[in-house]
Image (tube, rainbow, N blue to C red):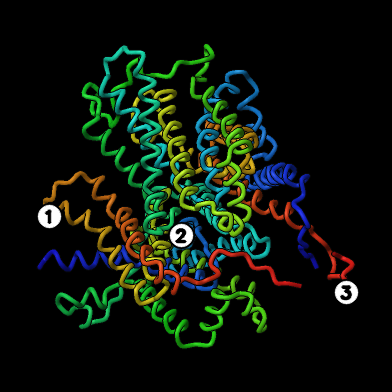
Amino acid sequence: MVRLEPRRQHSQAMVYLSPVLAILMTLFVGGIIFSFMGKNPFDALYTFFILPINNSYGISELFVKATPLVIIAIGLSMGFRANVWNIGAEGQLTMGAIFGGGLALYFYDSESMFLLPAMFVLGAIGGAFWGGIPALLRTRFNANEILTSLMLTYVATLFLSFLVHGPWRNPEGFNFPESRPFPDAGLLPVIYDGTRVHLGTAFAVLVVIAGWILLSKSVIGFQLRVVGKAPQAARHVGFRQKRMVWFTLLLGGALSGLAGLFEVAGPIGQLQPAISPGYGFTAIIVAFLGRLHPLGILFGGLIMALTYLGGELAQITLGLPNAVTGLFQGILLFFLLACDVLTKYRVRFGTPAAKGEAA
Amino acid sequence: MDWLIPLILTVITASTPLLLASTGELITEKSGVLNLGVEGMMLVGAISGFAVTATSGSAILGILAAIIAGMLMSLIFAFLTLTLMANQVATGLALTIFGVGFSALVGSGFVGFAIEPLPGLHIPLLTDIPLVGEILFGQDFLVYLSIVMVIAVGFFLSRTRGGLILKAVGDSHHSAHAIGYSVIKIRYMATMFGGAMAGLAGAYLSLSYTPMWAENMTAGRGWIALALVVFATWRPGRLLAGAYMFGLISVLQLHAQSAGVHVPSQFMSMLPYLATVIVLVIISSDRAKIRLNAPACIGQAFRPAQ
C-alpha cells in the first residue's frame, strides 16, 4: 500500500525538483501520444522541443512568445498567492489592446514620440479596468472572481470582434475584418536587428525584477505571502482581504493589458479579431510552472513559449494538428499539480507502523 | 403566435446541455468538491460522442462513449484533488485546458463530418396535437432525460438516506468521517457523476444541438453551468428554472435578428455572459443565503487523521 505522510516542513529540494519531474513526465507521455498518432516519438519530440531553437532566429522567436506569458504570469502569480483566482487575463489582454491600440488608430497619421508612451498608459488602464470589474464584484457583491473574470473574457473578445468588423475596420482594407496598420510612431521598436524581439521583451525582464522586489522586500509582498499560506493568521493581524483582491486584480489586469498592447503594437502591428493564441490562459500554467516565483516564472515562460513554437513547427513539418500544443500544456499542468504533493508529503510504501515509528 | 413555437423549441435545445451539466456539478459540489473542469469534460464528451457515432453509426454507442469519457476526465480530477490533495481550483482549470486541447486533437479528424441528428420522439396523435404537441412529445430522449435527472437529483438530496450522507460529507467532512462514512469514496462517486453528466451534456451538443464537431463548440457553456449552480443556491428546482432562463437568453440573438432588431450580432452574443455576471452578482450579494446553502466544505481537501 502506498501512503502519503505529511512532512514537518516543505521539502526545499522538491520545490525545485517537482517542476523538472513534471516536465520529464510530460515528455514521456508526449512521446507515447506521438507514437499513437503514428509518428516516431523521438523525431516528434525533437521537432517539438529542439528544432525550434537550434538557430539564433528561433531563440529570438522564443523571447517574442515568452514576453506576454511572463508579463501576464507575474501579475497572476501575485493573485494566486493570495487565493485570488483571476482567470480572465485573456480578456484583460484584449481590453489593453483595444484601449492602447485605439489611441494608435485615432492618431493614425501621428509622428509624435509621445504616442507610444501614451499607448502604454492606456493599455495598462484598459487591462486594469477589465480586471477591476471582478474586483469590484467580489469585494462589493461577494461574486466569485473566477466566473466573472472568465465571462468578461468572452465579452472582451466579442467587443474586439465588433470593433474590427465595424467602426474600426480599415477603410482602405478591402473589407477584411482588421484595423488600419498602426503608424510607425505607435509601433514598438525592435531591440535586436533582424529579429522580432521588441521593447516589450526588455519590459518583461523589468517586470520580473520588479515582481521579485515587490514580493521579497515590500510590505504588500509580505502580506501576499502570509494571506496565501495562513489566511486565518492574516485576518488576525488585520490584513485586509479586500485590499488584496483589489491590488492583485488591478495589477494582474494592468500587466495583462500591457502584454496585449505589446502584441498589437509589436508582432501584429494592427488590431484584428484574434490577437492572442490563448496567452492569458497559458500564463496560468506559467505561473504554476514557475512556482509563483518571479524567477521561476521567467523560466516557465520560456518553456511554455517553446510549446507554441514546437506546435507550429510540428504542424508544418509533421502535419500534426496545432491542438497538440494545448494538450501538452494541459498534461504539464496535471503533472505539476501531482508532483506538488511531493513537497508537502513523503510517499511511503507499506502499512503504517504500529508504534508510531513511521513519524 | 407563429414565432412562439419555434422560440420555445430552440429554448429547450439551448437549455438542455446547461441543465445536464449543472445537474451533475450540483451533486459534485454538494459532496464538497468544486470541479471547475466542466467545460473540458463537456468538450471531451462532445468529441467522444461524435467520433463514436460517426464511426459506428450508432448514437446510443456515442452517448455511452460520451458518458464514459466524461467520467474518465472527472477521474483524473478526482485522483489529483482527492487522492493527491492538489488544489481544486488549479486542477479544474487544468482539466479544462487539457479538455480543450485533447478534444481539438481528436476532433481534427472529424471536422466536416455530418451525422444524423438524434431522432425526436414521435407518438402518434400526441405529437400531432397542434401547438404543444411537438414541444411536449416531440423532443429527443436526452431532453426528457435532463428533466428526469434534475427531478431525481432533487428527490435523492431531499428524500433519501444517500442524499443525506452526501450532504453530510459536503457540509462537515470530519464529522461524516467520524461516524464512519468514507469521505473520499463518496466524493469520488459524486465527482464521477458530475463527469458523466458533463459528458452527456457534451454529447447533446454534438449529436443533437448542432450535429457536427467544431473546436471549442461548448463556447463557455461549462462555465455558465457552474454559475447556474451558484444561481440555484445548490437547489435542483431553481437549477431547472435557471437553465431555461439562460437557454432563453442565449437564443434571443437568433430571434431578435429575424424580428428586425438591429443590434450588432456581437452584442447579442455577449448576452449570456453578461447575464451570468449579473445573476452571480445578484445571488452572491445575499451573503446569508449563500452561507446557508453552500456546502460548507466546498473546495477543501480532506485528509483523514490516522
> What amino acid is found at the position of numbered circle 3 in the picture?
Ala
Residue tagged by mark 2? B42
User: Which residue lies at the image location 70% right of the left edge and 72% below the top edge?
Assistant: B304
**Residues under numbered marks 2 and 3 in contact, where contact means CB atoms less than 8 Å apart:** no
Q: Residues within 10 Å of mark 3 (few under 14, many from 20)?
A: few
Q: Is residue B17 visible?
A: no
Residue tagged by mark 3? A354
> What amino acid is found at the position of numbered circle 1 in the picture?
Ala
Q: As displayed, is residue B108 above or below residue A348?
A: above
In the image, residue B305 lies at what x, y percent?
Answer: 73, 72
User: Which residue lies at the image location 21% right of the left edge and 32% below the top edge?
Assistant: A167
Disc 3 secondary structure class: loop
Q: As displayed, is residue B50 above or below residue B234?
A: above
Q: CA distance from mark 1 to mark 3?
A: 75 Å
In the image, residue A319 lies at what x, y percent?
Answer: 54, 36
User: Which residue lies at the image location 45% right of the left edge and 70% below the top edge?
Assistant: B291
Q: Earlier in the sequence, mark 1 or mark 2?
A: 2
Residue tagged by mark 1? B259
Please tell me whether mark 1 or mark 3 is closer to you in this view.
3
Disc 1 secondary structure class: loop
Q: Is residue A236 visible?
A: yes
Position of the N terminus of chain A by quadrant = bottom right
